[in-house]
Image: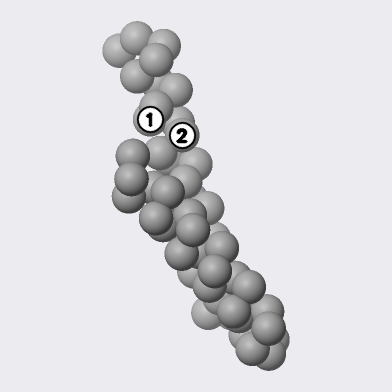
Amino acid sequence: MNEKENQKLEEKKRKVLEILNLWESREIGRVGNETRTREEKKLNMVEDDALEK
């Protein structure tokens, strides 16, 4: 694999881990609606971004 492919894989891996971390924090730390809503918005943005690539 060349450097460009490696970078793309690393970026995808980072996004997947970010999504998993957001899901985990969403499940564990439901500290009121405001926090959950903010995390869900971020999660949706990250998921949409990951799906576009």
Report the residue marked by disc 1.
9
Q: Nearer the viewer, residue 25 or 42?
A: 42
Q: Nearer the viewer, residue 27 or 32?
A: 32
Q: Residue at x 68, y 83 (%)?
A: 34
User: Relative to residue 50, is residue 29 drawn left or right?
Assistant: right
Q: Is residue 51 above or below residue 27?
A: above
Report the residue marked by disc 2.
11
User: Relative to residue 1, is residue 32 drawn left or right?
Assistant: right
Q: Residue at x 41, y 11 (%)?
A: 3
Please name the amino acid that badge 1 sits on.
Leu
Residue 46 x, y percent position in the rendering:
48, 55
Please name the amino acid that badge 2 sits on.
Glu
Residue projecting furthest to the bottom? 32
Q: Quick one: label 2, few (<14), some, or many (20+) residues within 10 Å?
A: few
Q: How is the image coloured?
A: one colour
Q: Is residue 9 visible?
A: yes
Q: CA distance from mark 1 to mark 2?
A: 5 Å
Residue projecting furthest to the top? 2
